[in-house]
Amino acid sequence: MFLEGIGEDVTREGLLETPDRVARMCEEIYGGMGKTAEEHLSKQFTVDNNDIVLVKDIMFYSTCEHHLLPFFGKAHIAYIPDGKVVGLSKLARTVEVYARRPQIQEQLTSQIANALDEYLAPKGVMVMLEAEHMCMSMRGVKKPGSKTVTYAARGCFADNADRQRMFMDMVRSR
């Protein structure tokens, strides 16, 4: 319907298999629909150490629900365990669950933070996303390279400027 809507000849050789390709692509890029991070965050390990855990520069790709164009960037996740941790890859998988659905970046940031808070029950969580939005880069205002930064803080990060600063310093360190 989209191809017909823009005036394409859907019987053209190069487009004959396009609907099937697009269907397979949608299964992949919207594969987070109806899923939660519970399956990834439920396998936990007991630890004595309750110091900050940070995984940064987790690449993600998502889709703007307003224009159905991609936005992509890096997620940075920190939490302070309360006796339990998860495998580091589970944090990246949590980002993927929520990134693979049409939405806005602000919601994606909150979903990740809320999932960690709910399923891990840590002392605190901090999530920051930095992303470029194709709806700003290739159309409309046409400002490629512009980044949108969102963050969410829960628990002991929420009202503690020192912990938030520590998180930001850790994210910015290379």
Image (spheres, grey):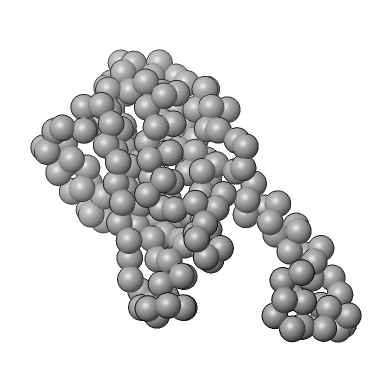
Q: Relative to residue 18, is residue 89 depicted above or below?
A: above
Q: Position of residue 43 (x, y in %)?
A: 52, 22
Residue at x 25%, y 26% (from the top left corner): 155
Q: Position of residue 171 (x, y in %)?
A: 26, 50
Is residue 54 at all visible to an observer of this figure?
A: no
Is residue 91 at all visible to an observer of this figure?
A: yes
Residue at x 80%, y 66% (from the top left corner): 19
Residue at x 70%, y 51% (from the top left corner): 27
Q: Nearer the viewer, residue 51 or 75?
A: 75
Report the number of discs.
0
Asked if residue 31 lies left or right of residue 138, the reply is right
Q: Relative to residue 98, is residue 129 depicted above or below?
A: below
Q: In the picture, residue 39 is in which quadrant?
A: top right
Residue at x 44%, y 19% (from the top left corner): 45
Q: In the picture, residue 174 is in which quadrant?
A: bottom left
In the picture as drawn, the residue positioned furthest to the front comes out as: 5
In the picture as drawn, the residue positioned furthest to the left comes out as: 162
Q: Nearer the viewer, residue 172 or 96?
A: 96
Q: Position of residue 142 (x, y in %)?
A: 39, 80
Q: In the picture, residue 114 is in which quadrant?
A: top left
In the rendered image, the quadrant that contains the N terminus is bottom right
Q: Position of residue 163 (x, y in %)?
A: 16, 36
Q: Relative to residue 57, is residue 132 depicted above or below?
A: below
Asked if residue 146 lies left or right of residue 64, the reply is left
Asked if residue 65 lies left or right of residue 140, the reply is right
